[in-house]
Image (cartoon, grey):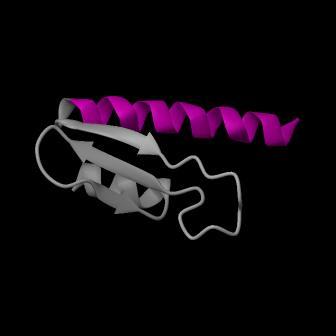
């Protein structure tokens, strides 16, 4: 049960960060790799309207970037 609640909190957090990114001119994408051993498994990318995408290793790094 706790695991399910933890996932919901994570989903809420990601959705909040998606809205925050949209207000700043970015789109937040999660890299969808099936293989957990892939180097970019579970990472995130912020794609600006113009320019080069920025890759992040965790959702915490995305949050830090968007709030700074």
**In the displayed structure image, the side of residue 16 where residue 11 appears, left or right:** right
Can residue 27 be found in the magenta stretch? no
Q: Residue at x 57, y 70 (%)?
A: 39
Q: Is residue 39 above or below residue 13?
A: below
**In the displayed structure image, the side of residue 23 where residue 64 appears, left or right:** right
Q: Is residue 13 above or below residue 36?
A: above
Q: Camera-side residue: 51 or 19?
A: 51
Q: Residue at x 44, y 52 (%)?
A: 44
Q: Camera-side residue: 67 or 54?
A: 54
Q: Could you say which quadrant of the image residue 17 lies in?
A: top left
Q: Position of residue 40 (x, y in %)?
A: 53, 64
**In the displayed structure image, the side of residue 26 where residue 33 appears, left or right:** right
Magenta region: 1-22
| Dominant secondary structure (helix, strand or loop) of the stretch shown in magenta | helix
Q: Residue at x 11, y 43 (%)?
A: 50
Q: Is residue 18 above or below residue 47?
A: above
Q: Position of residue 43 (x, y in %)?
A: 50, 57
Q: Is residue 12 above or below residue 40?
A: above
Quadrant containing the N terminus is top right
Q: Position of residue 16 (x, y in %)?
A: 41, 32
Can residue 7 be found in the magenta stretch? yes
Q: Position of residue 47 (x, y in %)?
A: 27, 45
Quadrant containing the C terminus is bottom left
Q: Residue at x 71, y 62 (%)?
A: 36
């Amino acid at each position: 049960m706790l695991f399910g609640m933890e996932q919901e909190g994570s989903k809420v957090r990601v959705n909040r960060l998606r809205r925050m990114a949209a207000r700043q001119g970015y789109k937040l994408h999660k890299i969808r790799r099936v293989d957990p051993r892939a180097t970019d498994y579970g990472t995130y990318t912020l794609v600006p309207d113009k320019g080069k995408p920025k890759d992040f290793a965790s959702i915490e790094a995305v949050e830090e970037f968007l709030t700074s």
